[in-house]
Amino acid sequence: QDGGQETSFRWQCVDQPIGKLLFRRFLEGSPEFAAAGALWSEIEAFEQCEEVEREGLAKQLRSRFFTPGGSEHCGFLSAAATATPSG
């Protein structure tokens, strides 16, 4: 029993401002997770940007995080997660 408390990752580390801040600081402060923290920040910025900026920002994200050899390649992501969208 969780005593009625929500215990999901999403609730604790995404929906709750303090939990989100602490988790992001953890990611950014750990060399092995820093790229994941940077990716999260960039995806949030992408979600907030104007539609006309999205294509360029998406290319930058793919190059930086999804491409082997990229400056902050996130090799832990699956091929499906990093595939260029079709259509």
Image (tube, grey):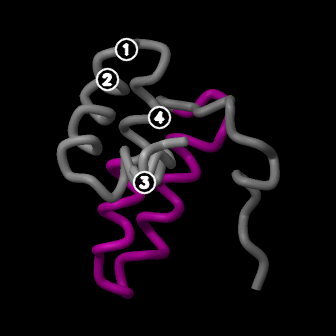
> Which marked residue is nearer to the observer: mark 1 or mark 2?
2
Residue 9: x percent and y percent? Answer: 48, 45
Magenta range: 41-70
> Which marked residue is nearer to the observer: mark 4 or mark 3?
3
Q: Are marks 1 and 2 in contact (CB under 8 Å)?
A: yes
Under circle 3, the secondary element is loop
Q: Which mark is residue 4?
A: 3
Q: CA distance from mark 1 to mark 2?
A: 6 Å
Residue 27: x percent and y percent? Answer: 37, 26
> Which marked residue is nearer to the observer: mark 1 or mark 3?
3
Asked if the magenta segment contains residue 49, the reply would be yes
On the image, numbered disc 4 is attached to which residue?
36
Q: Are marks 1 and 3 in contact (CB under 8 Å)?
A: no
Q: Earlier in the sequence, mark 4 or mark 3?
A: 3
On the image, numbered disc 1 is attached to which residue?
30
Residue 70 position by quadrant: top right
Q: At 46% from the left edge and 45% from the top edge, which residue is drawn?
A: 7
On the image, numbered disc 2 is attached to which residue?
26
Q: Amino acid at mark 2?
A: Phe
Q: Earlier in the sequence, mark 4 or mark 2?
A: 2
